[in-house]
Image: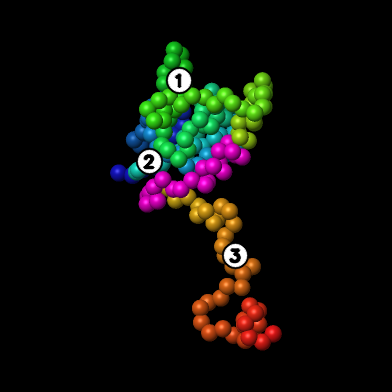
Amino acid sequence: MSQKFFLNLKHGSFSERPTHANEKVYSFTEIEAHLVNITFKPSQYGEIMKLHLVDENNFYMVSLFVNTGAAHAFFNLVKSLHLIEKFKLKLVPKEDKTLLCAEQFGALVKWYRDYNVILPADAAQRTEYFTEMIKHEILPALQKLPNPFPLHPHYKPLPKRALYGGYFNAQQSYARVVGPMSEAERTDVGYGKG
């Protein structure tokens, strides 16, 4: 059965927030899927990064506050991921905290360390640097990738022409309905008199 899961990091797992008392709540310690998009949303408690993930049947949206350790772990490993391949996003308990890590091709994904700049020491500036990196490096790379599941019931990306400018703009085009061409149309497009 195909489902959508809207997940937050809670008590060492990716968990849904129940909307009413008798609702079944799903919880995961790992998700194996393709990363298809990353969005950012401001909230009253701080900016939230939403990871959009899909597998063969399900759609997952994992929400992380950008100033948390889990978000910074993702920031540090995302440039080491092969974005066209699926990976496993995992939460691993360690002492009194839970660590976010990723596995791809059967091995842990190492944090990317070859930045061209010295990362800011201030946590707020480092978070801003990483969110800009996501927006200007990772998102354009994700948008160029093919849809991993074209017939997925819950995930339909925007068509590429919508992302990069359409082939047809109804308000600026001379497109016409197929049929006989009028005299005015012939002169507009260079056929006939004129």
The three-letter amino acid code for the residue at tag 2 is Asp
- Between residues 62 and 137, which one lies in front from this camera angle? 137
Give how far across and how far down residue 52 sits, in percent: 47, 40
Give me the residue at 59% from left, 57% from top: 165
Above-or-below relation of 167 to 188:
above
In the image, is residue 53 part of the stretch drawn in magenta? no
How many neighbours does mark 3 have within 10 angstroms: few (below 14), some (14-19), or many (20 or more)? few
Disc 2 marks which residue? 55
Disc 1 marks which residue? 98
Disc 3 marks which residue? 169
Give how far across and how far down residue 112 sits, in percent: 54, 26
How many neighbours does mark 2 have within 10 angstroms: few (below 14), some (14-19), or many (20 or more)? some
Q: How is the image coloured?
A: rainbow
Instruction: Describe the element under mark 2 as helix, strand or loop.
Output: loop
Range covered by the magenta-colored residues: 134-154
- The answer to whether any part of residue 191 appears in the image is yes
Select label 2 or label 1 by which is in front: 2
Give me the residue at 63% from left, 78% from top: 189
- The answer to whether any part of residue 18 appears in the image is no
Give me the residue at 69% from left, 85% from top: 194
Left or right? Give the position of 80 relative to 19. Answer: right
Above-or-below relation of 117 to 148:
above
Left or right? Give the position of 184 relative to 68. Answer: right
Instruction: Describe the element under mark 1 as helix, strand or loop.
Output: strand
